[in-house]
Image (tube, helix red, strand yellow):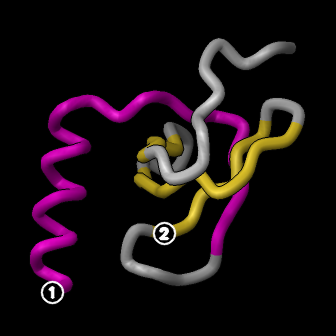
Amino acid sequence: MIAPWVPGPGVLVKDTQRGLLGEAVGWNAGTVTLAPLGGGEPWETDTYSVPNELDRLRARVASRRRR
């Protein structure tokens, strides 16, 4: 199966199975590797989507709180 959207490195991605946001750091055969926005161990998922505006807002707020 070919993914309808392939995120490039550094792009914000939503793992729809876990409900988590991450930064794309790799892609292989329909699976994307995501790095947590606040740091930590990357994970892989094959169920992902473009984050909506609310997701992006939450990511910006979390980023500012970490500063």
Determine if the magenta segment contains residue 46: yes
Three-letter code, disc 2 = Pro
**Could you say whether the residue bearing mark 1 is in a helix, strand or loop?**
loop
Q: Which mark is residue 1?
A: none
* Horizontal side of residue 36 vs 3, given as left or right: left
* Horizontal side of residue 5 vs 27, given as left or right: left
Determine if the magenta segment contains residue 20: no
Give how far across and how far down residue 17 sits, in percent.
55, 42
Mark 1 → mark 2, Cα distance in angstroms? 16 Å
Q: Between residues 64 and 43, which one lies in front from this camera angle?
A: 64
Give how far across and how far down residue 41 sits, in percent.
63, 79
Q: Residue at x 52, y 44 (%)?
A: 15
Disc on the earlier residue, 1 or 2: 2
Where on the picture, by quarter, is residue 1? Answer: top right
Q: Residue at x 81, y 14 (%)?
A: 2
Three-letter code, disc 1 = Arg
**Could you say whether the residue bearing mark 2 is in a helix, strand or loop?**
strand
* Horizontal side of residue 45 vs 5, given as left or right: right
Q: Which residues are magenta?
A: 42-67
Asked if residue 41 is positioned above or below residue 15 in the image, the reply reads: below
Q: Which mark is residue 67?
A: 1
Q: Which residue is labeled 2 in the image?
A: 36
Q: Mark 2: few, some, or many residues within 10 Å (few <14, many ≥20)?
A: some
Asked if residue 38 is positioned above or below residue 49 in the image, the reply reads: below
Asked if residue 59 is positioned above or below residue 50 in the image, the reply reads: below
Q: Residue at x 47, y 57 (%)?
A: 22
Give the quadrant of the C terminus.
bottom left
